[in-house]
Amino acid sequence: MTDCCSAPGLMPLHEGLEKLMTETPVVTETETVALADSLDRVISETIISPVNVPSHDNSAMDGYAVRFSDLAQDSILPLAGKSLAGHPYQGSMPAGHCIRIMTGASIPEGADTVIMQEQAEITGQGIAFSKLPSQSGNNVRRAGEDIPQGCQVFEKGHIIKAQDIGLLASLGIPEVPVIRRIKVALFSTGDELKLPGETLGQGNIYDSNRFAVSAMLKRLGAEVIDLGKLRDDRHEIRKAFLEADQQADAVVTSGGVSVGDVDFVKDILSEIGHTSFWRLAIKPGKPFAFGKLPNSVFFGLPGNPVSATVTFQQLAVPALQHMMGAEPAPAAELPATCLTPLKKQPGRLEFQRGILSTNEKGEAEVVTSGSQGSGILRSMSMANCYIILPASQGNVEAGETVRVQMFDKLLR
Ligand code: AMP
Ligand code: MG
């Protein structure tokens, strides 16, 4: 059974993603930021190492620097001096001698090998080595062996992680060329919505989508323009769309994309831009609108909170990363034994929420994180992964193997 046959009229996820990728423009403007401010930014040009790392031949151990060939004559060598990290031995090591050396200290000229101090003893005649090295070069870290000068370190499109900042610092690079941040305008729609802190009246609920999506956008490294919540009012929504379009590269809304009486989002989008409204073959998150306003692209998320999060993360995020000029690594997926039975009807690809762990044998196991309704945020909040159930799949029995997608940094 294929996706399309099993869910007639619904668009498979991969098809939606392909359309988003081809229709979302890529931001090309660049800027330079201080290294310390470059976390999560997207590198805009290839970074070449200006130096060798390490910059000099140095010791990997605390011990003694020797000339390997001297050990053929004698395994006791007189001490000629010391080399400490930041304080190298001055001059050239005299033949037939050794030098006290610490980890990270420069290998003195004339020496080629380090013997660790556990294999050496101080005697009246000099340093006696109990175990001789098997070859020249032992315990020596060569200049450039980690990163040679002139080698390519990062490609354009790389998203800078914390450890990359450390690496760039180790190359002595103080600033990084990056793509400018994308600006994303965000609002939620619905007459029922109240702000946390306000009192709920009859039929009201709190606006949660805007807070969750805003947090994910921040993790993504976007500049969020939070335009608040809109009433289900054609005039108000239209005005807000036009204003958002003036300020942002992308506009994200939640709610109002279904077929209800006050679901105006897609009508207005069609009036002032153009829209493709999709019914996706995924659960949660069937309705999804993608479109173009005069200056920006538009993502209309469904109102149900779990659907909003899942569609944002599975569809809007890859498109926004494409817009940011980024080449993100695909989300990690792995097989895991499902310890709880899962309800599933064949037809749509499902992103059920689960809790992944490893058992005492080191094997991956997953359980459902609770009730899977598209409005139930608790099971989303408890989860650390999606259990991905293909369209053709029916119920899952406890003990079956399922595929699991780890939450990435947006949801972790
Ligand atoms: P809609 O897509 O506008 O028909 O909304 C579908 C469901 O999601 C309804 O139960 C709404 O009350 C709910 N909903 C819509 N927007 C939000 C929001 N921003 N936060 C929480 N729930 C919402
Ligand atoms: Mg609504």
Image (tube, rainbow, N blue to C red):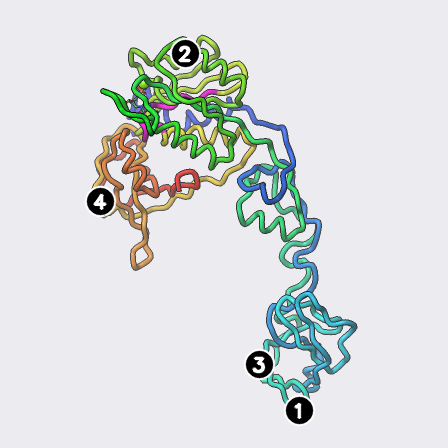
Residue positioned 72% across, 74% down in the render: 111
Residue furthest to the bottom in view is: 124
Label 1 to label 3: alpha-carbon separation: 17 Å
In the rendered image, which residue does mark 3 sit on? 119
Q: Is mark 4 within 8 Å of ligand 1?
A: no
Provide the residue designation for mark 1: 124
57 up-or-down from 203: above or below: below
User: How far is mark 4 from mark 3, CA to CA?
Assistant: 56 Å
Whole-percent x and y of residue 180?
Answer: 59, 31
Q: How busy is the neighbourhood of tag 3: few (under 14 within 10 Å), some, or many (20 plus)?
A: some
Q: Amino acid at mark 3?
A: Gln
Q: Amino acid at mark 2?
A: Glu
Label whose residue precedes the other's in the sequence (1 or 3): 3
According to the picture, the residue beneath numbered tag 2 turns out to be: 236
Which residue is labeled 4 in the image? 340
Magenta-drawn segment: 298-308
Q: How far apart are the alpha carbons under marks 1 and 2?
A: 92 Å
Q: Is residue 316 magenta?
A: no
| Residue type marked 1 | Gly
Does residue 262 appear anywhere in the picture?
Answer: yes
In the picture, which quadrant includes the N terminus?
top left
Of the 4 image quadrants, the one containing the C terminus is top left
* Amino acid carrying mark 4 in the image: Thr
Dot 1 or dot 4: first in sequence order is 1
Query: Residue 172: percent from the left, percent from the top?
Result: 67, 50
Q: Are marks 1 and 3 in contact (CB under 8 Å)?
A: no
Ligand 2 within 8 angstroms of badge 2 C-beta:
no
Q: Are marks 1 and 2 in contact (CB under 8 Å)?
A: no
Residue at image coords 45%, 22%: 227
Disc 4 crowd rating (10 Å Cα; few below 14, some 14-19, many 20+) is: some
Q: Which of the 4 image quarters holds residue 38?
A: top right
Ligand 1 in which quarter: top left
